Image (cartoon, rainbow, N blue to C red):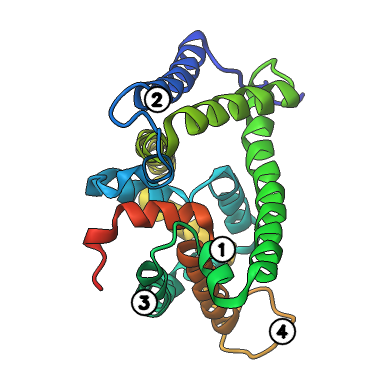
Amino acid sequence: MGSEKAVLSAVDYILFILMLLVSAGIGLYFKFSGGKQSTTNEFLLAGKNMPILPVAFSIMASFISAVSVIGIPAEVYMFGIYVVYYYVSYPIGAVIASYVCLPVFFKSGECTVYEYLEKRFGKLTRTLTSMVFLVQTMLYMAVALYAPALALSAVTNMSIWTSVISVGVVCTFYCTLGGMKAVLWTDLFQAMLMFIGIFAIIIKGFSDIGFSEVFRIGYEEDRIAIPTLSPSLTERYTVWNLLIQGSILLVNELWCKSDSNSEIADFEKYIPF
């Protein structure tokens, strides 16, 4: 006999709907309060006067999507914890972005890196890089929306398309109305929900199986290992590809993506340069 399908309870549905309503409500609040998103500085940069907490959580949340929450556990289950070492490279990328790339961007006074590229290299460069970013973002967002929709459809009677549309409409709604302020505060709210869920799963797993037993099983099944120093390009994970890829990705996230530029611009007075 197959295992019984797990489904959401009434409480789960209520919490899910409340999460969507709160996210939409944040967008409405900032649409009709303060500067009412009436200027480019207000809409894209939140007036450059945001507090530390929402900006820090928003930057962190930009690295955590459904792709990470669903995909990385599957990757670790199949191939081991090699991918965890990928994050060791983040300090390298952060130093490069903070002390080499971002000072140049801030001194330019532009809102996005693409405006800087136009000033430095011409309109053609801006157009080409903007097009590449749009294509990359559309492809990424398609996967980022599909992953939670797939999870929702597995535990509800909702179709994948219904899940994609409902989540996509709410996100578009609060971003369009509330601007960067709504994005930052919603990221804080949603990041806290994600962490609560992740820690609940971790605590439940350790409670049911036992802390030492988790690592014993992982060790016996060869899921706990250190990547090799091999220069081979055919190995799935090595120290070199993890360090290089992770560093480049973080520089891209903090400097090359216009959404990250806007978040960091809010945080300008706290960045050490």
Q: Which mark is residue 95?
A: 3
The residue under label 4 is 233
* Circle 2: element type: helix
What type is the residue that disc 4 sits on? Leu
What type is the residue that disc 1 sits on? Tyr
Q: Is residue 86 above or below residue 62?
A: below
Q: If you read the primary sequence from the N terminus, does the residue marked by circle 1 or circle 3 appear first?
A: 3
User: Which quarter of the image is occupied by the C terminus?
Assistant: bottom left
Q: If you read the primary sequence from the N terminus, does the residue marked by circle 4 or circle 3 appear first?
A: 3
Relative to 202, 152 lies left or right: right
Q: Residues within 10 Å of mark 2 (few under 14, many from 20)?
A: many
Q: Which mark is residue 31?
A: 2
Tell me if label 2 and label 4 are in contact, CB under 8 Å: no
* Circle 1: element type: helix
Distance between the Cα atoms at labels 2 and 4? 50 Å
User: Which residue is more in the foreground, 148 or 181?
Assistant: 181
Is residue 170 visible from the viewing direction of this image?
yes
* Circle 4: element type: loop
Distance between the Cα atoms at labels 1 and 2? 26 Å
Tell me if label 1 and label 4 are in contact, CB under 8 Å: no
Q: Which mark is residue 114?
A: 1
